[in-house]
Amino acid sequence: MKQKIINVDLKVNLDPLINFTQGIFQKKEIKIITEELSRVAGFLWDRRWAERNAGNISVNITSLFSIKDLDKFSTYPFLPLPREYAGLKRQLLLITAAGSRMRDLAMDPLEELCLVYISDSAKAYHIIAPERIEKEPMPTSELPTHLAIHEMLCRTNAPEKALVHSHVTELIALTHNPKFLSAESLTGILWKMHPETVIFQPKGYGFVPYTIPGTEKIATLTARCFENNPVVIWEKHGAMAIGKTISEAFDELDLAAKAAGIFLSCARNGSEPDGLTDEEIREIRQHYCL
């Protein structure tokens, strides 16, 4: 359905806004983030976790702009949001565009990204493209989930600013096993497979039973999981992770995938591994004061 554009004043001279938009992506801090995003997109593609246009990434970059700069975004035309995101009022997100491919993001991120600015009312947003002012892209179809998670992070004053979603093969494979269709069972097996998961992911893993992606339902369920977990696994679909940086969010996925891969490798060899004992896990937690 075509979205209705609101708050449009055709008499507004957009030239200064276009110049401002193009200047955003020349900022040193933004260049560092887009370069990091490019590297991580390459990692996702190399690991075969991003077939076709799978996967999406977003970063809250509001803190990199002054109040005066944010005021300039209010003069753009806005698109209505399906609901109010009160915690995201006047927040600015760098996010992958709909249909973008990780292999293309790795080579030329500015062609596959857009900015999403949430209005003062928190009920509308504007899309800003770095290089395609005349043909602005739509953000990823998982926008509701990204918005819900970033709103939760803002509301709880969490330090995490980045979110990475990918079709992590090893984690998808685990959720095709009915034994691992809960947060508790997934956490148990991943902790048992690799001591590093206990050390770096001591809160365990969130889990969302199969739900149609891109919906408000999966957005709500996923955001709720992230209140207590750094990684959320979607049944038969993939996983999402949060981090202070894009690289940190990738690390969370990479570690969980390593543990899942160890289990799957053992299973392929005909034996289901016992893994670390409960006592060994307790010793690790005690040693690292977790």
Image (cartoon, rainbow, N blue to C red):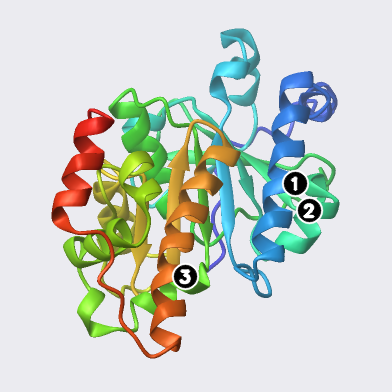
- Placement of the C terminus among the 4 image quadrants: top left
State which mark lies toward you, 3 or 2. Answer: 3
- Evaluate if marks 3 and 2 touch, with contact meaning CB atoms under 8 Å apart: no
Mark 2 vs 1: CB contact within 8 A? yes
Q: Which mark is first along the chain, 1 or 3?
A: 1
Mark 3 or 1: in front is 3
Q: CA distance from mark 2 to mark 1?
A: 4 Å
Query: Which residue occupies 33% across, 77% down?
Result: 175
- Which of 236/70 is in front? 236
Please state which amino acid type lies under the numbered disc 2: Ala
- CB under 8 Å between discs 3 and 1: no
For mark 3, does the 10 Å Cα neighbourhood hold few (<14), some (14 to 19), or many (20 or more) residues? some
Q: For the residue labelled by badge 1, is the local secondary structure a helix, a strand or a loop? A: helix
Query: Label 3 belongs to which residue?
Result: 261
**Amino acid identity at mark 1:** Ser
Residue tagged 2: 106
Left or right: 151 with respect to 38? left
